[in-house]
Amino acid sequence: MDEKPKKCTVCFEPSGLKTEVPVGTILLEAARKAGVYLSSICGGDGYCGKCKVIIDQGQFQSRPTTLLTPDETRENTVLACQTKVLSDMTITVPKFHTLQTSQILMDTDAHRFRELAGDVREGVFEFDPLVQKLAVEMSEPTVHDHTADHERLYVAIREQIDAPIMQTGFRILQGLSKTLRSTNYQVAVTVGWRGGTTEVIEVEPSMRSKTNFAVAVDLGTTTVVAHLLDLTNAKTIDTEATYNSQINFGEDYIRRIIYAEQNNAFEEMQNRIVHDVNNLIVTLAARQKIDLHDITAVICAGNTAMAHFLLNLDSTRIRREPYVASAGFVPPIRAAEAGVQINKRGLLYCLPSVAAYVGSDIVAGVLTTRIYTKKGISLFVDIGTNGEVVLGNRDWLVCASSSAGPAFEGGGVRHGMRAGAGAIEKLDITPDGSIEFKTIGNTHPAGICGSGLLDTIAELFMNGIIDRTGRFKANGDTRLTEGEDGLQFQLVPEANGHHEIVITQADIDNLVRSKAGVFAAIRVLMNSTQTKTEDIDATYIAGGFGNFMNVQQAVTVGMLPDVPVETIQFVGNTSIAGAKTVLLSRKALETAEKIAKSMTYFDLMSHPGYMDEFTRANFLPHTDLSLFPSVKSVKCET
Amino acid sequence: MDEKPKKCTVCFEPSGLKTEVPVGTILLEAARKAGVYLSSICGGDGYCGKCKVIIDQGQFQSRPTTLLTPDETRENTVLACQTKVLSDMTITVPKFHTLQTSQILMDTDAHRFRELAGDVREGVFEFDPLVQKLAVEMSEPTVHDHTADHERLYVAIREQIDAPIMQTGFRILQGLSKTLRSTNYQVAVTVGWRGGTTEVIEVEPSMRSKTNFAVAVDLGTTTVVAHLLDLTNAKTIDTEATYNSQINFGEDYIRRIIYAEQNNAFEEMQNRIVHDVNNLIVTLAARQKIDLHDITAVICAGNTAMAHFLLNLDSTRIRREPYVASAGFVPPIRAAEAGVQINKRGLLYCLPSVAAYVGSDIVAGVLTTRIYTKKGISLFVDIGTNGEVVLGNRDWLVCASSSAGPAFEGGGVRHGMRAGAGAIEKLDITPDGSIEFKTIGNTHPAGICGSGLLDTIAELFMNGIIDRTGRFKANGDTRLTEGEDGLQFQLVPEANGHHEIVITQADIDNLVRSKAGVFAAIRVLMNSTQTKTEDIDATYIAGGFGNFMNVQQAVTVGMLPDVPVETIQFVGNTSIAGAKTVLLSRKALETAEKIAKSMTYFDLMSHPGYMDEFTRANFLPHTDLSLFPSVKSVKCET
């Protein structure tokens, strides 16, 4: 009496796409099979709530979830990833949902961060995008002008752009003559810059020449940000961000490499980040009603490990002495080769990187801040898990990466958290000793994010609650108690069922080590180039945490050198700004390559002076107070 | 009581390769499935006899064939393409057979032709092959030399060769770091020249750097010739030839294009020629015990249509006014993309062509004869189905193609045949009027091939049997009789069961038209460049038929201009010689490209003077006897 596994037909509206699947198939899988793209950031684990669909007809079984409102449940809205197909079904894929998908999941951090990207400065580089669509008109062949179609096309392209070396894919060549004849030799030609050559990517009817888009991506270890650009006019149309879904495999990329090595999971690691990138692209395209076919390029900047993950290059040596990448200059590849879903012949570019620990995001930062053009010396600091530092001017550039650790991203800190809703982002100890703070979203505090932690350390120090070594002073403050990990200081008392928020001695030690790592890196570069603090004309702070921090406090705790606060600038997400600059100009790509080649990298692990600098920086603000005259004058005479 | 289709295991010795197939499967197919390559030129039709194997064990059913000797049949030798698998089987693939496969089918014509290729002249172009294997040694990375693997490789390659623009395939990049580490950074790098860029094709252990082969192919409409070259020392190791198996679809390429259009058979057309090329490559590789993996390049020359067939480019416009090719300059592609079986990342090059009717074989001819370097004017004639003609010197080059028709290849001639065994290749009418001749293989004559036909016309003319219009003269010769197509002249009487051999008025008309086409093309070029016969310093005759013809007779009938016979040279198969020259030197490729670009093509169909010249040439030797003083002096005073 056994029945064979029954097949069910699932039809997705409004597209009308259909598929046949066995009873019990997860609806998200059925959608994929039918070619219906549902946003899903958690990869089907049921916690992102992005894959909501409405069941119009048919039997199903859904696992309970808190991500649906009672109204939604009444209207048969389900999470596709939590729902099994039990019969033939008709499904509606909500339009408004796919268009505004970001509002469902994107949390404050990602949202705040995505807004940070500086606009590409106009006029610095000539507008000459890496991928262009040219409207190409050729005269039709005659007996007196019998040039072959392929050469005819090249001649016409070269009338418009400088392309001494060209290439054409075999499939394009095979279809070329038919296309030219069916269009009376009036075509839109997509050409892509490919490491010294110009590739004919596509030949289409000429009306398509006005539609050309690209996506720039900042591959952050924590957050992945994407900007959609119109390549016909260099405008940024839309932006989106998501968490890097590799995060389950480790907060920092070294842990992810270890995880991947131990679990043979490099492919999975690639799938995750490619999935994130695709998710962003699809979200942007859907919201802007753009066909993926019209997105002809993706450009990525990020740390070296993330670029390796994205392309599944061998990253195992990044974490082992002598810390070598597979490739710093990754040649452009077809995006489809890496699984990135744009035009199937579209190109994927990666900005060049300097070393295993100084990635293309830093090159992008140098490009964006234009340090490499200035006579005076600039300092560029990107404080994240690593804390990359660049020092230099138009004549020289040096760089290093301190493994600052994730303390300022909330890692290794009892009540540390990422900059999401409820995170304390500002904190102040008033003259009467009471603590004032501001949370993201102005809700009850759930923890402390990076900028709040920096404030905390600085305020504790300035108010004499911790000493120059970061140790709590036993001064009778009742908020200072013995906790399970030693001394801890209460910042927010327990209230209304919300837990108290404290900072422990271990937290402080971690934070001091983090800031010491950054400062020691800066010092090594300064010493190596005989740069004094007063020689630094400008300091640029990039990255997510950096842009919300109080720079005065960063000087106070000795994370940044004691430069005039007015010479310190927040420059936002220079990684994506640099990626966009390069996307829009071949000349900028050349410049980025020159920057990457010309930067001298200091490996701090093997640098004889680094440990000493690090030890000296493990004080507030520093062992050598003469380096911090402004702090000394306020505080350190005590 | 129905049985399910039984599966049989077929094991091929000595390789031990196995496969499972349903009962009734053709053995040739089973071999393909098992990955055992059996030579098969007829494509499984049972007439080439190349796929002989020995059945050691198992039941089978073979169709009768005359291609096996009784001894072979006794020893269970079968044709794999004519044999069905009926049970589990063990098969021996004879070694000696695959190694000497050419002796089974290759007939005299192909054999003669393959010997014709002139050697590549040494010293003309620097030895710098299009694909090279470099022994590359890098120092291993240290903390002080942390250059990424990919850039390290590029630096090391650039120490050896000039490669300003390089590219690396994605898969190579993904495996690069592992390869470098497992070889201690001592590798063999295969680099290929790809239209202005240098591609890293493969990175292998260093011991493989000494093994690098390539195949040069002349894609003839009738015969396909391949030469195997050792790219480490520029030596030609072996040669092989086969008939072009597209021949069933038409003797000339125009008919094949028509056939393919009418039968939607362009893919089949490609499959055939690719199959022929693969057959040649496999035969050469097997005979020389070379792994296909070590053949890293294939280079082809041939007429424009054949290049289109090989790559399945759109050839439909070649036969239609204004006669335009899809591509004259075909970019190098991965051979595997076209189905050519060498190293799976190896490159396939096509020499550049000039126009739809002047292919890369002619460019190769100009390159080989070095016309383009000479102060004096040279004439280059490749007489085949088309009869391409080049005239020029170091300052200018003009070219044209007469559709001479296949008369001199035996087409449209009653007893015409290709230059196989039994073909009359020389013919002479002695002073007493009797006919002497020589056949290929010295057997009883079966027909007349090109050189014999030329002799026949010339001798009939010189002996007054035909007049200057090519008409038979009614002079009472009993060999001249009325046949079914009008007058015919008996060359060889019927004897011992062998049929008589005659030449008919229609044959002569065809042959005269053919020679008139070639001469008219030459005249158009001469007229257009104000070249007189006495200005021609050297005449080069290329191609299969050309190289066996009596040049004096070619002048006598007015196919060639009346230049001193001693200035006429046979240059053999310049198509393959040119392909080899280019294969061995990037500079030669550049030169070939320059030649192809600089040649001015005259389209005779639309040329106002051509028809007139053709009509005037439809005489023996010509209407204007002043053009043929040497012939006039011997004969034409009559």
Image (cartoon, coloured by chain):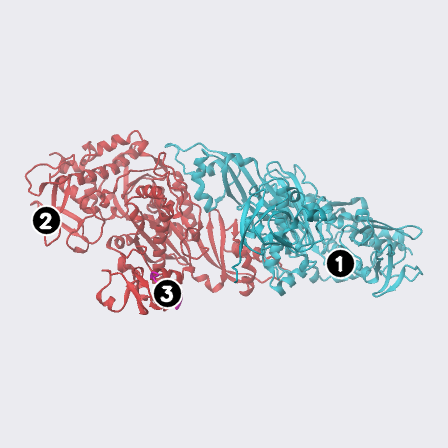
Chain colours: A red, B cyan
Location of mark 3 (residue):
A1
* Same-chain status of marks 1 and 2: no
Q: Chain of mark 2?
A: A
Amino acid at pointer 3: Met
Location of mark 2 (residue):
A493
Of residues B28 and B461, the one drawn nearer to the viewer in this rendering: B28
Gap in Å between the C-alphas at discs 1 and 3? 73 Å
* Same-chain status of marks 1 and 3: no
Relative horizontal placement of residue B583, taking residue B422 as reference (left or right): left
* Residue A440 x, y percent position in the rendering: 19, 53
Q: Can residue A43 be seen from the camera position used here?
A: yes
Amino acid at pointer 2: Pro
Q: Residues within 10 Å of mark 3 (few under 14, many from 20)?
A: few
Q: Chain of mark 1?
A: B
Q: Residues within 10 Å of mark 1 (few under 14, many from 20)?
A: many
Gap in Å between the C-alphas at discs 3 and 2? 66 Å
Q: Chain of mark 3?
A: A
Relative horizontal placement of residue A413, taking residue A374 as reference (left or right): left
Gap in Å between the C-alphas at discs 1 and 2? 104 Å
Q: Residue at x 43, y 49 (%)?
A: A586
Numbered-mark total: 3
- Magenta residues span A16-26
